[in-house]
Amino acid sequence: MLTFEKRVDDIPRWLPVATSIGSVVIAFILSGIILKLIGGEPLVVGQFFFEATFGSWPVFSDTLVKATPLIMVGLGCAVAFKMKLWNIGAEGQFYAGAFGASLVVLVLLPMFPTMPKVLVISLMIIMGMVGGALWAFVPAYLKAQFNINEIITTLMLNYVAVLWNNFWIFDRWSDAGFQMTPVFPKSAWLPRLADYASDYRAFSGITLHLGVIFALVASFIVWWILERSSWGYEIKLIGDNPQAARYAGINISCNIILALMVSGALAGLAGMSEVSGVVHRLQERISPGYGFSGIIIAWLAKLNPFAVIPVSILFGALILAGREIQPSGLPMMLQGFIMFMVISSDLLLRYRIKWTTTNK
Amino acid sequence: MTQSKPNAVEMKDMVIRFPGVLANDQVNFTLQQGEIHALLGENGAGKSTLMSALAGLYKPAAGTIKVMGEAVSFNSPKDAIAKGIGMVHQHFMLVPTQTVTENILLGLAEPKFFMNLRAYDQKVLALQEQFGLRVSPTAKIWQLSVGEQQRVEILKLLYRGANILIMDEPTAVLAPQEIEELMQTMRAMTQQGKSIAFISHKLHEVEMVADRITVLRKGKVTAEGYSMKGVTKAELARLMVGRDVVFTVKKKPRQAGKVVLEMYHVQAENDKGVPALRGVSLEIHSGEILGVAGVAGNGQSELAEIITGLRKCKGSIKINGQEVSNQPPIMAIKRGVAHIPEDRGKVGSAPNLSITDNSIMKNYRQAPIGDGWTINFLSAHTHATELKAKYDILAANVNMPARKLSGGNLQKVILAREISTMPSLMVAMQPTRGLDVGAIEAIQHLLLAQREAGAAILLISEELEELLALSDRLAVIFDGRIMGILPNDDQISINQIGLMMTGSKE
Ligand SMILES: Nc1ncnc2c1ncn2[C@@H]1O[C@H](COP(=O)(O)OP(=O)(O)OP(=O)(O)O)[C@@H](O)[C@H]1O
Ligand SMILES: [Mg+2]
């Protein structure tokens, strides 16, 4: 019989890393087995998966494009989770960020059509982050002031954000009755490598945009905040023991609001980067669930801002493969398996599993 | 010594290692049936570790454990309780919102889904009767005092059929009256054939209840199973720390200066919303130690918390002439108020953060540790290493998470952190709780050094002896009121303090 024993000794340092990697490997193997059972060729599909996502510069660039918003969202989740704030509203904050960035293009830009590109993009970044931060402010305030569970409020606001965007793209900014705004003018587009194809032939068709640099810079900044700054220390302290943090003179309410807003701002930045770097307009379904993937990514990366990068690339590949591979449900299944494995591996960190024979 | 009874427990050549620490080095320990066996030793000597191994929490690297003559090997506390061994930890593991009976039944196969709880209330009552452990079975845990919660923990073990009880510093959190009751319970239990292993730093308690003692020092046994007959406190102390301990501290005459803390008619409620302070007025001068005596739960915790900004209050509190009541904790810290909290685990430390992180909780905003924006982890590391050396904190290194420290060493980290801020006002609640006799001596000297350096110290304690040794004046608190403040001189009467502690006016 399998029995679970609560771990009393310490978990070895390599175990969390091993479980993260193990979760992914096992998820791949399980998917392979299922594929085999339904009559597929797992190795062929696997090879196809690899080629469609990492096989050449153009597809790898596509993978990175998908990874870009994931990194930002994953970082946002990591900041909140570090303080044991369960922000599962990154999806909504992403939409709010996309909306904020679009405001710059659709409201401000028509008033000052000659605004230079640098200014437009900068304003879009600011408004994207403000949008995400404000969307997170609501649950943050409710949590800080009335101790209302942030899991529920952030989750519900996801739906509100989608509907809010829908109102604007259906009703106000609709492009000839379609559910999307008109295409943004070029000055609101993040530069892509493909833009430089006339100078460097190799860049032609490469969709990688400046957002990826934002994502990498954000990883470094978040790492610096968490590991080097006073605020990072306060986040750690609150996350580990709020009572001790209060005793150390830290204002808990203020920090709940601040951390959730930073978390939201990062998700908002992802929304901005998507509309400005990829979609070039605000429309329905700009996110295939980036906000939710961010939760798993943060967890799989054990809240380490640098580990978020490779994990996001893997998830970016999964999303990309979802469009290339038939049956397209396969990458979805993989994601599902990974999530399942991540959660069950957490059990492994806290319990020891033993095989005991039942002779009493 | 002739062995009339069989041994309940025999531990032989136990070796337990942690990274960088040999916590138990070839330790032998025998618990006879029906005895109370005290385990003594310095902070970090390995007492809790040895007993945790007996309770199935750690696996020894080497050594054998026999229970009632049978060799055993435990993988979890469950295995240990199956052999009748249970441990009462210092931090209770009870569900606050459930009743006493529910907590006792928690995790058992019977009854399913908590059916017919009444019948079980009766069972619990019968068990209480048998050992003199009074606590209402239908009360919710959060309504209980610490002493009552401890009784629930003991009942839990007895209900599971424990015959061998391990108690890790059970008296550290108890009021003197409760200690007396616990000792009676312990005697009742041994009379009914149970055996008790008991860890304590309080030598007079050991003298009172223990039949035999085993002393550990730096992981090794220095006295194995000595009979307590005819052993004096001084001898015990020498066995523990390896040198003579001076039990009386010398105090220089008071050089009291200006008023540092001034409280006028302060009122506050406790966590349950019941008035806990009903108009407290007092003042402390620089260079003075004001002791606060009283039975636990008469407003001492709240008194400490309102001064440090952790609790709301009515009335006036002035520090160095400035009104501070109802200001956030950071203001108290900035005004130079240090605080040694009552609960080192829940309030005073962050268990999963490193010793370094724990040691900078109060000064991470100031140079050289920080500048308000960043933290210089190199200076933080240096700071922690210095404290570790100066305060004799036993740990493999300062990167170790605080939860791995022994109880007394965690207390030392907190003391080191607070004293090293050179406060103008120190609010110290049970500062020497959980420390060994040697460390107590050292800390008392440090507190006196603070006083000589001009700090004002509010010393809240349940140990009258300590209060009398250190205080310049002694306030007695009862039911949220100061019953009187006595100068601590030759004429002070312990009898009178006792009366005041139970409510009669000066
Ligand atoms: N989980 C752990 N990991 C690493 N070291 C540990 C762990 N638990 C205990 N130690 C170390 O083992 C030594 C013995 O600790 P133990 O808790 O047994 O001491 P103790 O005798 O109970 O002291 P105290 O009187 O202070 O409670 C200490 O140096 C402590 O730091
Ligand atoms: Mg201990």
Image: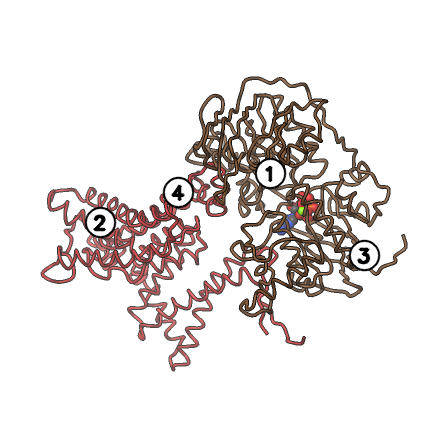
Residue A84's disc number:
none
> Which residue position is annotated with label 3?
B32
Q: Position of residue B176 (x, y in %)?
A: 68, 41
- Secondary element type, mark 2: helix
- Secondary element type, mark 3: strand
- Secondary element type, mark 1: helix
Image quadrant containing the C terminus of chain B: top right
> Which residue position is annotated with label 4?
A253
Q: Nearer the viewer, mark 4 or mark 1?
A: 4
Q: Residue at x 77, y 55 (%)?
A: B190
Q: Residues within 10 Å of mark 2 (few under 14, many from 20)?
A: many
- Secondary element type, mark 4: helix
Q: Position of residue B406 (x, y in %)?
A: 65, 45
Chain B rendered in what hue? Answer: brown
Residue B413's disc number:
1
Q: Nearer the viewer, mark 4 or mark 2?
A: 4
Task: Indicate the amino acid at tag 2.
Answer: Ala
Q: Which chain is disc 1 placed on?
A: B
Task: Indicate the amino acid at tag 3.
Answer: Gln
The yes-or-no answer for disc 2 within 8 Å of ligand 1 is: no
Q: Which chain is disc 3 placed on?
A: B
**Quick one: which chain is red?**
A
